[in-house]
Image (tube, helix red, strand yellow):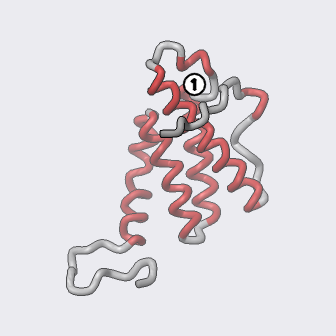
Amino acid sequence: MQPGDQAPGNPETKTSLEYLAMARDMSAAAAEEADMDSVKAFGLLGLANHAMCYSIAAYLHVGTAVRIGYSLGLHRDIFLRSKGSLERERSRRVWWTIYVLDYEMASRFGYPCSVIDDAVFMSTPRPRSRC
């Protein structure tokens, strides 16, 4: 089955392109919310666009995730002091994920990065503990 194909025998099944279009339609509302879920949503939307070879859209959505992250203060450790340890770690991981995505998209497509390294005062995530 190719991207965009429907599952046989189920006319109500949406294709990946239909889901991508729905996500794009909802992106304005996600940007207005400007919360952690918005950062994650735009990061994922950037990855989905990249997978579908929509390079400009991928770059723009990841850049939006970075800017929402800035607006939430995710780039600063001081923002996280009021949160519990689990929430702090999640925030670090989200920030560094969009940081890497931004650098990847920018270098891959030849655009400037949205992240300004001199403005980032966030420690890196802790290594995963082994079970």
The residue drawn where x is 45% and y is 26% is 86
Residue 36, above or below 83? below
Q: x, y (%) of residue 85?
A: 48, 21
Q: x, y (%) of residue 74?
A: 57, 28
Q: x, y (%) of residue 31?
A: 46, 41
The residue drawn where x is 48% and y is 13% is 82
Q: How many marks?
A: 1
Residue picked out by circle 1: 73
Q: Residues within 10 Å of mark 1 (few under 14, many from 20)?
A: some
Residue farthest to the front? 131
The residue drawn where x is 66% and y is 31% is 124
Residue 86, above or below 25? above
Front-most of 60 and 46? 46
Q: x, y (%) of residue 47?
A: 55, 58
Front-most of 47 and 67? 47
| Residue 87 figure quarter | top left
Front-most of 83 and 114? 83
Query: Position of 108 compared to 87: left or right?
Result: right
The residue drawn where x is 36% and y is 61% is 22
| Residue 16 figure quarter | bottom left
Query: Position of 88 compared to 25: left or right?
Result: right
- Give the quadrant of the N terminus: bottom left
Q: Secondary structure at mark 1?
A: loop
As shown in the figure, which amino acid type bears the numbered disc 1?
A: Gly
Residue 56, above or below 28? below
| Residue 118 figure quarter | top right
Residue 2, above or below 17? below
Front-most of 92 and 32? 92
